[in-house]
Amino acid sequence: MIFPKATISEIIGLLEAVNDSGGIEDVARLAADFDLEIDEILPSIDGAELLGLAVVREGNIELTTDARKLLDAGIRDRKKIIKDKVASVDMIRELIDRLRSEEEYKISKEEALRFIQKKISTMDIDSYFRIIINWTRYAGLIGYNSDSEEICLLQKER
Amino acid sequence: MRKGYFILWIILFLISATIAFYFFDFVDFPELKLVPYYAASSFLRMVIAYFFALIFALGYGYTAATNKKAGKMMLPLLDILQSVPILGFFPAAVLFFIAYFPGRTGIEAAAVFLIFTSMAWNLAFGVYESLTSIPRDLIEAADSFGIHRWQRLESLTLPACVPKLVYNSIISWSAGWFFLVASEIISAGSGSYRLPGLGSFFVDTAYSGKIALMLIGLSTLIIIILLLELFIWKPMQSWADKYNYDYSGEKSPGEFIFNIKIPKYMFRLIFETFSNILINIYIIFHRHELMKRFLKIVSYLLLILAFSYILYFFVILLVRILLNMPEEAYSIPLAIVYSFIRLFVAYIICILWTIPAAVYIARNKKASAYLMPVMEVSASIPAIAFFPVIVIVFIRHLDIASVILILMGMQWYLLFNLIAGVRSIPKDLENVAASFGIKGFFYWKKVLLPSMFPSFVTGSITAWGGGWNTLIVAEYIVLKGTEHHIFGIGYLLDKATFSTPDPDMVILSVISMVITIILLNKVIWQPLYRKALTKYKIEV
Amino acid sequence: MLLEIRNVSKTYESESNKILALDNINFTVEDNDFICIVGPSGCGKSTLLRIIVGLEKPNSGEVFFRGEAIEPDNPKVAMVFQNFAIFPWLTVQENIELVLESLNRPDEKKIACKYIRAVGLDGFEKVYPRELSGGMKQRVGFARALAVEPVLLCMDEPFSSLDALTSQNLKDELLMLWADASMPPDAVIMVTHNVEEAVYMANRIIILSPRPGKVMADMRIELKRPRNRKDPEFYRWVDKVYSLIV
């Protein structure tokens, strides 16, 4: 699978911009508005799609109803919506299941990297790790302790 | 007044005073006539040692850079050699060389060897890093263009070679001065072997109470060091800096006292010739497969020979010593503990004064404009030169004297690193502190001290290195034929060399000391260094 | 009247010459002002902000906060920095508690927690800055500034070291906090070189001239919130500001 290298902030920023254009916008124009190359904006678009917040059709990006709900919400409620969305991403759900099966709901970074490597074959595994933690931490699902180099479930119910 | 000018006046005064003393016989000391001879002998030792160190560095660095397998062994070895207190080897070297060349030649060889060891490792690293940083495609380009087109490479490969070698040569020389003076002082103190030189001149004059003479000797040394600094190193460094492309971490030389405009083409000429030879050798060896293979075999043979000789030598020696442990060997652990306590006390004093001083100097523009040149000058004088003076003042309290000496060997490293550390704190972090009212104790604890942590760790590592070295001269002193000592590893080493020669004890002491230092590095400094790099690193 | 800037001038002296950076600046700040100071680079707008918070002293003129001369550590004025300026050796929570501790606020933990949640950083409390993306870092900057519950919030190009999309997101979130009446501050002064950003954020724009910086215009932006950058009305305001600069 491919996994987009975009942070949650970038994805929400993208949604806001599309919203300003009335909920649908040409991808090329969107990129031009932000002074970005197409390949610089693509990860954020892929991210929005993966989270079910936008659909791309014929070169246009369109917000989903969930995205509109997200944009109308305040900072706290946005976080809740993002949490549901992130938790429904296949790889992250599998990672959460994996953590739930562990004694103390945590695994080493090494192991997490191996897990990710199996799903995404890439040379640049570290930056994917960082993005995934960016998502899951914002969503309040999975955290990373850099001192012990472990990732752990933030909510400890099975 | 431009910053540092008053330093210049002091230097001028010292020069003219010294010249006056020489030529007008203001003081009628026959010893004075010998000062130029002493100065020349000391300087010559440095030059010879530097020459050998350079040759060694080129060979070692080249082999490590071109032969991957050998490099895997050679680099860690270099790392260990670098962390070892060189002065600890001096006694061993004296015994070794005296056995082969009796008399003056032996002791001269030992001194040159000691200075050599203080210069060589760091230069070898420089060569290795320079050669490995020549991009691979440049060598291939050289192949395709043919050797006569090496001129094309010149502008590209020069930057790789020059700055590192210049920079490391400067470090090597200042380390060399320390060990030169140290070796002369030790040998003069031993009574049995003498090295004519400024170091032994300090000892003789100080111990016989001719302080004026000693000061003249000292200013001669200062003048030599400063002249080298002003006319060779600083101009060379500012010249080499132009070729610099990846030195972001290194401190830029800036203005020393003032910059002398030496015709830059001089250095250019020297270094172009030098690096062209280097590059050409490198390219020739890479062009011809046969040559490459031949070289590989030769270097393997040499390496195997060297390693097996060392192994053989050490195994035999160790087995012999271990089978027949000298009685005194059992006091080595305790001696190390005693010495460690001295180092620790000096280190604590060092921390206590350098941290506030560094903050003050770095923060206070006026103070730093005046103090920095003074300190750079005092730091460039090997601390050990003050040794005889401290000895005669504190001879009854050698414990105090030794701590003061160790302090002098440690403090500059820490101070200069900390000043650089305070200066590199981003303005924005200071603004946060000011605008959110973070001040006083709280400011020191949460802002200032943590941001100084990385420079504190690097400073501490070098300071402890300096401390272990100073130990060797600080624990055993022969003053007017009488031996004074305090118990410690330095004392054991010196005693086994000079008063009751015992090669086994020398080797055992050196090995124990090296093991202690390596252990301390692994257990304390390396983890701290890692932490400094991750947690305390300020991203700019 | 919250803040008064009266006849402020600033000169920089180098070895040979004097450079006039700010020339006789006058304006006042009222409650509910969201002021953007706009000007080309080098017009001294950051210097002006630093004078306003008391980090620098003007050569002449004064800054009064509620009638009294400004002090840099005034807890009623807080600052957000362009390059975040958060301490790498402290966690997110410690970074925020640090400023509360230095002000001797009781229950600093509770206050820190409140503002960490307000900017959406919950879950990041124990994290060191090196693991944060730029957007998250600047959220720490916001949380820290808001945590001292300032009356006036000063921001020096707070979005200019972020990528375009992240800065879009952070601007909207900042405006949400601004719209929330239960949240500090009462007024904002933000420095920016980006006219669109200023029109998007501010209800009042002060335009500085190129060196030496002088107040060229002081105008209200009568656009209702939430604003839309694609709105023709928005463009008219942007054009209007541009026409005053050029």
Image (cartoon, coloured by chain):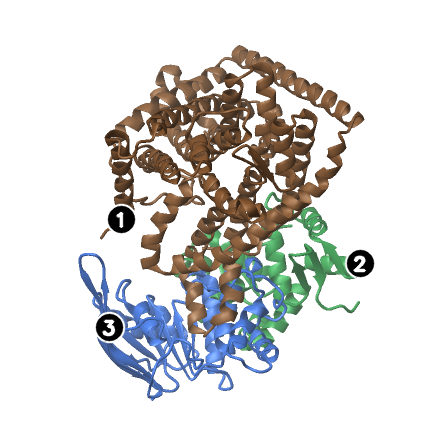
Chain colours: A green, B brown, C blue
Is disc 3 on the same chain as disc 2? Answer: no
Residue B404, placed above or below residue C54: above
- x then y, percent, for residue C14: 23, 59
Marked residue chain, label 2: A
Q: Quadrant of residue B389?
A: top left
Work out whether residue A45 or residue C208 is closer to the camera in this orientation and state it: C208
- B350 relative to C123 in the view: left or right: left
Work out whether residue C190 or residue A119 is closer to the camera in this orientation and state it: C190
- x then y, percent, for residue B7: 29, 46
Number of labels in the image equals 3
Work out whether residue B200 or residue B273 is closer to the camera in this orientation and state it: B200
Judging by the rendered image, the residue that carries numbered circle 3 is: C59
Instruction: Say which element carries label 2.
Output: loop
Residue drawn at (46%, 20%) of the image: B282
The quadrant of the picture occupied by the C terminus of chain B is bottom left
C-alpha gap between disc 1 and disc 3 = 33 Å
- Residue A102: image tag: 2
Judging by the rendered image, the residue that carries numbered circle 1 is: B6
Residue drawn at (42%, 60%) of the image: C161
Instruction: Say which element carries label 1.
Output: helix
Packing grade of label 2 (10 A; few <14, some 14-19, many >=20) is few
Marked residue chain, label 3: C
